[in-house]
Structures are given as structure tokens and as C-alpha cells.
Image (spheres, rainbow, N blue to C red):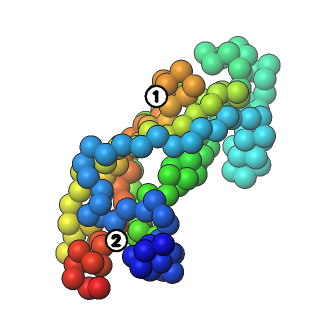
């Protein structure tokens, strides 16, 4: 292990983490996949109290445009944040999640296997010398590679201390 790798590990920066300077516009990743289960719907319903029958009543949901129960939209987003975190690109280098735009494009059903596609769209420096803002395009895709949710996530990232001359 190099000295730089040891230092990154000591301060809690993951092995795949990227500082602001290391994130180049156009760089893209695909997260690991995850299959949606009935337990996901049950747990999200219990957590939020959202008992809409399109999520909780199979007989009702069967007669909707979805043809059966679907995962809550915010639950898919929440699962996406976990899948995206498994990439490790922000582990110890993200300062704050600043905001997002987000659109639902299609349902996520029990048995669907989803993953996150992420791409660096834009970067801008901030007034604070130790941080920069990165805008990511993020899409949740199902097993047919259909985009079921998508949008932009704005994240404040740490700058690389070595690049700033603070080593």
C-alpha cells in the first residue's frame, strides 16, 4: 500500500473515492444490481405510513394501469442512493447532497432488478477553496435497461488537498 493510499484510508476515504479534481465530465458508472421484493414494499409502507392500495392491495392494483402492485416511487429513489453508494466514488469525499431534480418514468414492480447509471454532467468551483460542486445525471434502470426514474443530483465534493497545495 502506498503512502497516499494509507493516508486516504486513515482519514476514512474509500479506495474508489474521487475528489472534485478527479471527477471528469462524461465519466460514467453502473452500480451493482438489486432485485425488488415484496418485503421492500412492506418495509417502506411501515416506515412511511403510505398505504396507497396500488402498493398494498393486489386485487386493487391488478385493475390499475400497472397490472399489479408497484414499489413506492420514493422507495426506488432511496434504494438507488444505496446502490449508488456501493460504487464508493463519494466515500469520504462528498461533503453534502445539495439537491436534485427527479422524474418518475415507469413503475418498479416486485421482481424487477434495478441498477443505477451515473454520469458526471458538470462541475463548478465554489468560493470555499476546499470544495466544488458536481452535478451528476442519475438513472434507475430495470432489467430491460429501461429508465424508470432519472434526474440530476447536485453534490458538494471535497477538493484534493494535494492539488490545493495543502499536503
Residue on which the image places disc 1:
147
Give above or below for 2 relative to 51: below
Image quadrant of residue 159?
bottom left
Give above or below for 129 relative to 101: below
**Left or right, residue 55 beside residue 89:** right
Residue on which the image places disc 2:
158
In x, y percent, where is residue 39?
Answer: 78, 40
Q: Are marks 1 and 2 in contact (CB under 8 Å)?
A: no
> Is label 2 in a helix, a strand or a loop?
strand
> Is label 1 in a helix, a strand or a loop?
strand
**Left or right, residue 107 beside residue 154:** right
**Left or right, residue 164 beside residue 73:** left
Tell me what residue is drawn at x 27 percent, y 43 percent. Answer: 26
Tell me what residue is drawn at x 71 percent, y 28 percent. Answer: 110
Q: Is residue 90 visible?
A: no
* Label 1 or label 2, whichever comes before in sequence order: 1
Amino acid at each position: 500500500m502506498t503512502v497516499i493510499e494509507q493516508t486516504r484510508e486513515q482519514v476514512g476515504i474509500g479506495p474508489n473515492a474521487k475528489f472534485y479534481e478527479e471527477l471528469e465530465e462524461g465519466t460514467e458508472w453502473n452500480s451493482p444490481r438489486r432485485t425488488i421484493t415484496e418485503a421492500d414494499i412492506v418495509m417502506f409502507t411501515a416506515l412511511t405510513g403510505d398505504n396507497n392500495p396500488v402498493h398494498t392491495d393486489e386485487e386493487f392494483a391488478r385493475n390499475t394501469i400497472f397490472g399489479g402492485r408497484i414499489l413506492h416511487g420514493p422507495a426506488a429513489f432511496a434504494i438507488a442512493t444505496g446502490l449508488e453508494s456501493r460504487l464508493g466514488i463519494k466515500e469520504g469525499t462528498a461533503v453534502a447532497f445539495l439537491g436534485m431534480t427527479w422524474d418518475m418514468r415507469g413503475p418498479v414492480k416486485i421482481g424487477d432488478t434495478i441498477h443505477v447509471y451515473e454520469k458526471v454532467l458538470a462541475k463548478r468551483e465554489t468560493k470555499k477553496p476546499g470544495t466544488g460542486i458536481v452535478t451528476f445525471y442519475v438513472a434507475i434502470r430495470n432489467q430491460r435497461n429501461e429508465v424508470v426514474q432519472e434526474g440530476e443530483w447536485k453534490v458538494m465534493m471535497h477538493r484534493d488537498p494535494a492539488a490545493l497545495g495543502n499536503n
